[in-house]
Image (spheres, rainbow, N blue to C red):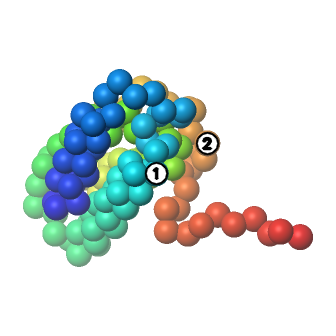
Amino acid sequence: MRFCQQLVSFANDHVRKQRGVSWVGGVGNHKDAFLPLYANMLGFHALSNCVFIRGGITDGGSLLSDVVKVGETIDPFLRNPLIQNLYLLVVKSHERMVSASTDHLIPKSSGDDSIWEDGADPFIPNLAPIF
């Protein structure tokens, strides 16, 4: 998938550029890293779900290998809770559709440290009433 390739390429390039620079909360909190990474991951998530809905899955193993590749590449960005939770949604949706255990896909650092227990819907902002 194109979004997967763009995501991996961007993450590798950005990590290479930022080597030695320490950002509070990790490199995923830098605006020049967050916006393109989140947008590409959101595209990957949305298009993966479209493929799942249309039944265009021919080889679930290749989809899981894409998720593994993305997870390994974006590991430095997973300290950002928005990126981490969107990645967890991607993993869970692939797990449901391919019917495979993805325990090995979820990085050790994400464990139970997630801010949202069931993940946040990346398409709907979580707005609290201001009254």
Q: What residue lies at 14% left-to-right and 47% top-to-bottom? A: 61
Q: Mark 2: which secondary structure?
A: loop
Q: Is residue 101 visible?
A: no
The residue nearer to you, when weighing 78 against 63, is: 78
Image position, residue 127 (x, y; %): 69, 66
Give amino acid for label 1: Lys
Mark 2 residue crowding within 10 angstroms, few (<14) / some (14–19) / many (20+)? few
Q: The disc labelled 2 sits on which kind of residue?
A: Ile
Instruction: Give coordinates of residue 84: x percent, y percent.
Output: 46, 43
Q: CA distance from mark 2 to mark 1?
A: 20 Å
Q: Residue at x 46, y 51 (%)?
A: 31
Residue at label 2? Answer: 115
Q: Earlier in the sequence, mark 2 or mark 1?
A: 1
The residue that disc 1 covers is 31
Q: Residue furthest right?
A: 131
For the image shown, how many numbered marks are present on the structure?
A: 2
What number is the disc on residue 116?
A: none
70 and 106: which is toward the camera: 70
Image x and y of residue 98, in percent: 25, 52
Q: Residue furthest left?
A: 58
Q: Determine whether, in the image, residue 18 is placed left or right of residue 57.
A: right
Q: Residue at x 29, y 42 (%)?
A: 14
The image position of residue 33, as x and y in percent, is 38, 48
- Vertical order, 62 against 46 (above or below): above
Q: Quadrant of the C terminus?
A: bottom right
At label 1, counting other C-alpha atoms closer than 10 Å, the crowd grade (few under 14, some 14-19, many 20 or more) is few
